[in-house]
Image (cartoon, rainbow, N blue to C red):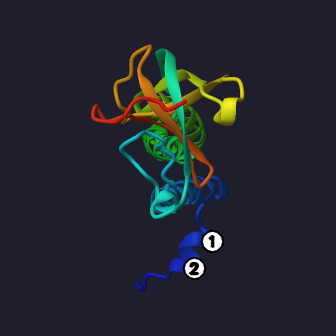
Amino acid sequence: MKFNIVSKIRNTPASSIAVAMTEILAFIVVAFMMMIPDPAQAQSGNVYGNGQVQVYSQAEEAVVMQVRIKAAEPTWQTRTAGAGIGAAVGGAIGSSAKNQHVGALVGAALGGIFGERAASAVMTSDAQEIVLQVFGPNGRPARVVTIVQPAPYDHLVSGERVYLSNTAGKWRVIKRSEGNVAFIR
């Protein structure tokens, strides 16, 4: 008796094929999402993305007015990977139900939802919301701005003098070294 994959597929119910294709697609999506590099978005004083290295940028002098810790949600790649893994696991668990085809579809749908939510909950990180008073150049009035920097970030306190820099379109607050000279007016 010869094994013939084509006849095996023809004799398989369409719902089973749909479940199998959904599981395969979920694994492919997860694999591709893990391969896509997440561009470095960190804007802290100690992490620079590839596009921010060896790039000219200007810095302005500023004073920290307020610092608060906030939550930064995970990237869409992370949430999509969680949904894909959850769908695959839910589909596999649901296929053991009495009606395995309906169970696998319902399991994949619920698993995808729970997987995305779990990834969002687990991968949420801290961010530092910094309100700055930036000194205007050439006697222009100072302005107040807000910058949110994801972890890892330097510990800042109100009243601390810092630099505000824009490197390749990414704003960051850079902690001053203790040996820096005083502001020149």
Quarter of the image for residue 7 reads bottom right
Left of 50 or right of it: where is 29? right
Indicate the position of residue 40 as horizontal and vertical percent values. 48, 52
The residue pinned by badge 1 equals 10
Amino acid type at circle 2 is: Val
Q: Secondary structure at mark 2?
A: helix
Q: Horizontal and vertical percent for residue 117?
A: 52, 29
Specify whether residue 98 is in view: no
Label 2 Cα neighbours within 10 Å, binned few <14 / some 14-19 / many ≥20: few
Residue designated by label 2: 6
Question: Going 64% across and 25% down the picture, which residue do you hit?
Answer: 145
Residue placed furthest toward the right:
140
For the residues bearing labels 1 and 2, Cβ distance under 8 angstroms: yes
- Quadrant where the image shows the C terminus: top right
- Tag 1's secondary structure? helix
Q: Look at 40% across and 84% down and name the residue there.
A: 1
Q: Position of residue 114 (x, y in %)?
A: 51, 30
Q: Among all residues in the image, which is located at the extreme left?
A: 179
Q: Is residue 173 above or below residue 9?
A: above
Q: Is residue 44 visible?
A: yes
Q: Position of residue 46 (x, y in %)?
A: 36, 44
Residue 88 or residue 12, whichever sits in front: 88
